[in-house]
Image (cartoon, rainbow, N blue to C red):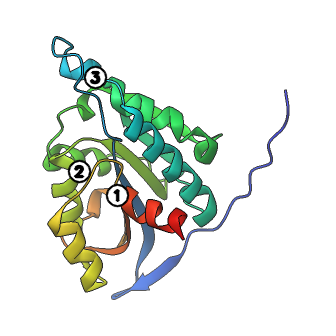
Amino acid sequence: MAFEPRILYAPAVFLSWPGKMTIVRRIFLLRHAKSSWSNAVLDDFERPLNGRGRRSADRMARHMVETGVRPDLVLCSTAHRTRETFERLVPALRGVSVLFEDALYGATDQDLINRLRRLDEAVRKVMVIGHNPGMERLAGRLAGSGDPDLRARLAEKYPTCGLTDIEIEAEAWGKIADGGGRLAAFVRPSDLEEGEGG
């Protein structure tokens, strides 16, 4: 089996008043790619991606490779469409640990923030692949600062396969709070299509 070298980076650490250490953590929130409604009798949990969704996920994988989006851990809903989205991101996530969790299907924003607060402290960057409305509401709750145009775009619509990158300083995962994060990036499939069009 081929050996894949792993490069480890020391996390950014800040000393906050009165002397407590905080660490910059990154939360990537990815809504699943667009799914198919062609089979009316198929249970919602089992719906696969449609052609557009597969193309969007492939573009997002290339974007992640090009921009260095690489979490330490992926938390993924067990629904068919989220698992399929993850599978198409494998070129960008090869070697990254993933946990498929039933509770992420239908999770509310509060459920999601509670899950993030239980993360192991060895994790500094996490990606959640999940569903609306929980993902959209969580992004809005966490991102208290950042580029006004990006925040306005996020508030307008969180499309399928949309990816947010939120940086948050906290002593521990259990300390992350509403409005405590900075929206560093918000990428939509349409942004990647425009880039390809030239």
- Which residue is disc 3 drawn over? 47
Q: Residues within 10 Å of mark 1 (few under 14, many from 20)?
A: many
Q: Residues within 10 Å of mark 3 (few under 14, many from 20)?
A: many
Query: x%, y% of residue 176?
Result: 27, 64
- Which residue is disc 1 drawn over? 173
Furthest toward the front, the residue is 197
Please report the residue visible at 22 percent of the width from the left and 26 percent of the height from the top: 37
Estimate the spatial distance between the alpha carbons at disc 1 and disc 2, rounded to whole Å.
Answer: 18 Å
Q: Tell me, yes or no, if residue 178 can be seen here.
A: no
Label 1: state its secondary structure.
helix
- Residue closer to the observer: 92 or 10: 92
Furthest toward the bottom, the residue is 17
Please, what is the three-letter code of the amino acid marked with disc 3? Arg
Label located before the other in sequence (2 or 3): 3
Please report the residue visible at 28 percent of the width from the left and 22 percent of the height from the top: 47
Q: Which marked residue is nearer to the observer: mark 1 or mark 2?
A: 2
Q: Tell me, yes or no, if residue 14 can be seen here.
A: yes
Q: Which mark is residue 135?
A: 2
Please report the residue visible at 24 percent of the width from the left and 22 percent of the height from the top: 38
Q: Tell me where residue 137 sits by quadrant.
A: bottom left
Estimate the spatial distance between the alpha carbons at disc 2 and disc 3, rounded to whole Å.
Answer: 19 Å
Label located before the other in sequence (1 or 2): 2
Please report the residue visible at 14 percent of the width from the left and 49 percent of the height from the top: 110
Q: Looking at the picture, does residue 124 appear above or below residue 111? A: below
